[in-house]
Image: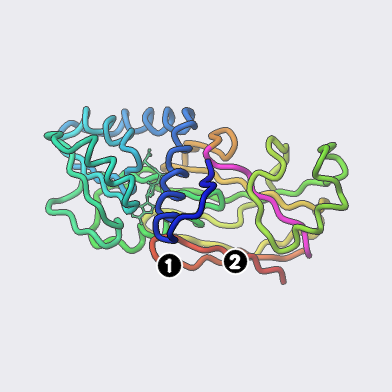
Amino acid sequence: MEILNDLPDEQFLDLDAFLSILSIYEDRTRTRRLQRHLRTMIQPDWVVVEAGAGLGHMTAYLAKRVKRVYAVEENALACRYLHYRFGNHPRVRVICSTIESWVPPEPVDLLFQELYGPLLYDESLGALERLQFKPRRVFPDGGALEVGLLDSRTLNDPVVKPDLVPLLNGALVADLVPGARFRPIGRVCTWHWPQGLHCQEVNLSGHPGDLVVFRLVVLHEGQVICRAEECPNWPLVFTYRAGDRFRLNFTYRDAYSRVELEWR
Ligand SMILES: C[S@@+](CC[C@H](N)C(=O)[O-])C[C@H]1O[C@@H](n2cnc3c(N)ncnc32)[C@H](O)[C@@H]1O
């Protein structure tokens, strides 16, 4: 979805982010897997905080099964929608705020979050290291960013030809070759709550290929919940191989992380 007319900057940014929230719900695999895991863990007397409630589909699921749900959402339009949807709900409190600047009025049994970006930490996971409260549990509590290599000569893609790939130098491009098959050669970063993010320099020497591929894996207690593409909400990410060693650096600002690709 794309906004095609000029709008004031603030309205554009809010609406653009809101439209990207809508597209999440096309990924039924993601929602099904999250619900399947939640079902096995939640208890009827729990207080649950949903960090980033979006349109409230998971909020509604949780509200049928626990004592109280705090649906915390920073996007103004999504939050307006949550108010329409849950305004009079006896078990849901809608909170229009970033999760990191809000303090719950009671102890929290579970924080449910889905703040993963296609590069693991490039959206809002960083918020969870900045919480002003300590939930008893977080679900999901982990993730990893895998890396692999492809040889563009073997892709047989009608558009992404080998002489086009170097033009991507320095850019991290989502969805360049949907469905690309590759074997991961390692992990660039891992994230675990409450410890946070750990990234390392990657050494590609000895591995052939001119196209670097990144794949997100969402984990809970070490078990895979979703992999990018298998859950289409998260695309694979590609870049041109500009050397043998690189790292990804993330900086957190205004509720989101920015990512920088550094070749060495
Ligand atoms: C991927 S959506 C998940 C929506 C919902 N939890 C679900 O699973 O269906 C992430 C949501 O988190 C919100 N969000 C992102 N960063 C946030 C933050 N720091 N505090 C509160 N909400 C945030 C986004 O606006 C978006 O609605």
The amino acid beneath tag 2 is Glu
Q: Is residue 256 left or right of residue 40?
A: right
Residue bounds of the magenta highlight: 233-242
Query: Which residue is under mark 1?
Result: 253
Of 23 and 132, the residue lying toward us: 23
User: Marks 1 and 2: CB-CB under 8 Å?
Assistant: no
Q: Is 242 drawn above or below residue 145 in the view shown? A: below
Residue drawn at the location 66% of the way across and 52% of the way down: 173
Badge 2 crowding class, 10 Å Cα cut-off, few under 14, some 14 to 19, many 20 or more, is some
Mark sitting on residue 63: none
Mark 2 lies on a secondary structure that is strand
The amino acid beneath tag 1 is Arg
Q: Position of residue 199 (x, y in %)?
A: 55, 62
Residue 133 falls in image quadrant:
bottom left
Q: How many marks?
A: 2
Of 145 and 2, the residue lying toward us: 2
Query: Which residue is under mark 2?
Result: 260
Q: Is 241 drawn above or below residue 23 in the view shown? A: below
In terms of secondary structure, what is the magenta stretch mainly? loop
Quarter of the picture containing the C terminus is bottom right
